Amino acid sequence: MKINFKKTYTFALISTSYITAFSTGFLAILLWFFNEFSLPIVLVFAVSIALFSFFVIQYRVERFIYRRVKKIYDDVSLLESTSFRNQPITTDMETLTKQVKKFATDKKLEIETLKVREEYRREFLGNVSHELKTPLFTVQGYLSTLLDGAMDDKKIRKKYLERAEKGVERLVYIVEDLDMISKLEMGDVNLELKKFNIVDLVQSVFDLLEMTADKKNIILMFDRKYNKAINVFADQEKIQQVLSNLIMNSIKYGKENGTTEVTIEDLVNEKIIVRVRDNGEGIEKQYIPRLFERFFRVDKSGARSEGGSGLGLSIVKHIIEAHGEKIYVESEFRKGSEFSFTLEKHQ
């Protein structure tokens, strides 16, 4: 451990002045009392006692403090080896106080962060368990019924196998989405950035989800006709997933005979913003801050009946943030919602 005294002489100077003043005054009184008073003698004595006192006090204080400060550093370094062991030892109490205070503050923040993470981990495991349990029990129930004799009835066999298949599909969705969001959070997903036309991509998503929207008689539409290509620089596959999740959500929670409208607008600094707007039920204000949490659903029973993993919006948020962009949400209860995100425009 490197030893580097940061010396402060304030304490020694003040202490020296007290000792010098008292000693010199006492000597002057004694000399005057014995009629031997001599100003040169008093001055020489004052200078001598001042120098002697200053160096003795400074030396003793540094030695006294250093031993105790070294023990503090050694004790603290057991907790934080990377921070304190690499720092020079200082006898400046102000500096030491700041360092220890900073250490304590950092540790407090670290403890709070660990508590939050532990709570998040506990909640996450509970959510995963709950989401996996429902389709697993469904599949198990249908298969057990078939094994108990229902297999002999062709109609029941086909119906139960189809339902078991749906349960397996939901399990696959959950596992795939969990794998995706874990990779996104860990930064293991490499974005394949390239130039593409966002208008064509939106239209392709419309085509994929058209049949799903028709079941609720929901119209998928642009806000206007885009005659020119609007090129962006992003990962086309990931942005397609973002659009699919947002438009699919607008269909799930949209009202029958409603609309899902996509708008593409120019922003400053070579950015565009893509808006996905519906006129569905909307979201109550208190739920909006939690929309992008894993497995969070405003209407848990209704959302689960619609299928999905409950991770869609969380994945959307991570994909957009992986691009270094922002995602926004605005909603008015019983009037509709709008999800929007920015992308880099490419000329």
Image (tube, rainbow, N blue to C red):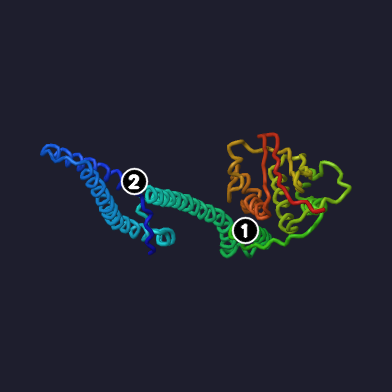
- Identify the residue shown where x is 34% and y is 49%: 9
Q: Nearer the viewer, residue 126 or 329?
A: 329
State whether residue 61 is above or below residue 146: above
Q: Is residue 49 left or right of residue 245?
A: left
Estimate the x, y position of residue 302 in percent, counting from the top left: 63, 44
Tag 1 near tag 2, CB within 8 Å: no
Estimate the x, y position of residue 96 in percent, counting from the top left: 37, 51
Q: Nearer the viewer, residue 330 or 343?
A: 343
Q: Secondary structure at mark 1?
A: helix
- Identify the residue shown where x is 79% and y is 51%: 202
Q: Which residue is mark 2?
A: 10
Question: Splitting the image into 4 quarters, where does residue 171 fall?
Answer: bottom right
Q: Is residue 259 visible?
A: yes
- Identify the residue shown where x is 65% and y is 55%: 322
Question: Splitting the image into 4 quarters, where does residue 63 fall?
Answer: bottom left
Estimate the x, y position of residue 47 in percent, counting from the top left: 26, 47
Looking at the picture, which amino acid does disc 1 mark?
Answer: Leu
Give the distance between the C-alpha atoms of the residues marked 1 and 2, in whole angstroms. Answer: 56 Å
Q: Quadrant of the N terminus?
A: bottom left
Looking at the picture, which amino acid does disc 2 mark?
Answer: Thr
Q: Nearer the viewer, residue 22 or 231?
A: 22
Q: Earlier in the sequence, mark 1 or mark 2?
A: 2
Q: Is residue 309 left or right of residue 101?
A: right
Q: Which residue is mark 1?
A: 184
